[in-house]
Amino acid sequence: MVRTAVDMSASRPAAAARLVPAFVGHEIYRRAAYGSHHPLAISRVETVMDLCQALGWLADGEFHVSPRASEAELAWFHTADYIRTLRQAAESGKIDVAARARYRIGTMENPLFPGLFERAATSVGGSIRAAELALGRRIVFHPAGGTHHGRPDRASGFCYFNDPVFAILVLLKGGLERVIYVDLDAHHGDGVEDAFAADQRVFTISIHERGRWPHTGDGWDDRNGSAWNLPVPRGFNDSELRLLVEDVVVPLAERIAPQAIVLTCGADALAGDPLSAMALSNVALWSTAERLAHLAPAAVVLGGGGYNPWTVARYWTGLWARLSGRPIPATLPILARHILAGLRCDLIEEEDMCEHWLTTLADAPNEGPVREEIRHLRDRALGKLEQSIPNLREGPTA
């Protein structure tokens, strides 16, 4: 039998059901970031940590402080000149015109701000730590992760580094030979897909809004069978998500029999997000993430996009409850409500606020008709799956 750092040969739901939950976080996310007038200049990870504390959902031994990735670790994926330039620009607060154009930093999209390098490196360190923990048969939640657009030599889409890549690299360094990456963010996980397009050990699956930036992942380029893209239309609802997950994603994953799964759970796929037009409820996304995480004996669950602080906090807090086996109350206690009431966001108009954003974690399900284009997307993917079955790569065997 081929051996790994931890024996992951039993990749069935029964094995995943025994996974021990862990939460990776850091106080660095309380510091102001991204400057003013940026979609990410809102409270996100720190609010999730506060809500989990208020609800008593971080037991002894569950919370793990994220380390900061060293420059040597960052160089596993990113180029040395980019790492150096980003660090120097973050320290000085300035960058010349040529370097700005070359590395895409110091722009409105990817601004410089105090503590930038440390924050971005801590996100990577958290995903490294999450994957290390997952190799010990854990299901690990790292909400500060999910910077899936980062490129080896430049920033992209609010992402300075690409922490999901590092989580996958740790799993591969641990000896695993079948890893699935599933991206549920509203935006295509282009940086992760490109990073592993030639790696026969990694499959990437992305369900994202069609026509949304970065305008990739249209479903036709499958990277020789390693990339599965499901671009969905505006107004994508819970019923449509369930169809694609149960008819496409789960059968594909079961055929691959992954030894580990990495999920990016961007909150911008939720109804009420100001930068996308999908219409999912958080309960549908909770169920999807929980379902997929239990398809492997090791799981890393990351955050991602999300620009409505109320929907982000409720989604990721409830996701941790589901992953760690905790019941979610119908209404929140006063302290948790106070935390949500203290959030602010210039992108959300007062008349667009929903009362339940301040009093509950769970959305009402958003069921609806399954549109013909979703069925067509499903059927096209199933046709590809049938053609690919004989050619899917075989993993370790006894």
Image: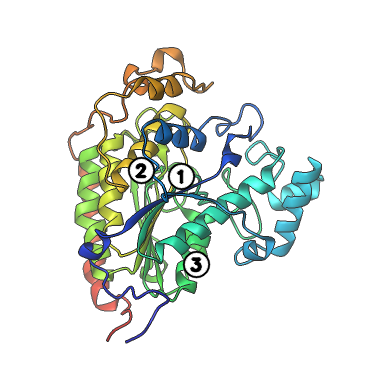
- Left of 208 or right of it: where is 390? left
Location of mark 3 (residue): 170
320 lies above or below 14 = above
Q: Give the CA distance from mark 1 to mark 3.
A: 18 Å
* Residue 194 appears anywhere in the view: yes
Location of mark 1 (residue): 143
Classify residue 313 by image quadrant: top left
Q: Give the CA distance from mark 1 to mark 2.
A: 9 Å
Residue located 39% across and 17% down the image: 353
Label 2 secondary element = helix
x and y, in percent, of residue 221 in the image:
40, 62
Label 1 secondary element = loop
x and y, in percent, of residue 60 in the image:
41, 47
> Please, what is the three-letter code of the amino acid marked with disc 3?
Val
x and y, in percent, of residue 396 in the image:
33, 81
From the image, which quarter does the N terminus lie in? bottom left
From the image, which quarter does the C terminus lie in? bottom left
1 and 2 marks in contact (CB < 8 Å): yes
Q: Residues within 10 Å of mark 2 (few under 14, many from 20)?
A: many
Q: Earlier in the sequence, mark 1 or mark 2?
A: 1
- Left of 167 or right of it: where is 68? right
> Please, what is the three-letter code of the amino acid marked with disc 2?
Trp
Q: Earlier in the sequence, mark 1 or mark 3?
A: 1
237 lies above or below 221 = above
Q: How is the image coloured?
A: rainbow
Residue found at the far front of this picture:
60
Q: Nearer the viewer, residue 356 or 5?
A: 5
Location of mark 2 (residue): 320
Residue found at the far left of this picture:
369
x and y, in percent, of residue 211 in the image:
42, 42
Residue located 36% across and 59% down the image: 138
Q: Residues within 10 Å of mark 3 (few under 14, many from 20)?
A: some
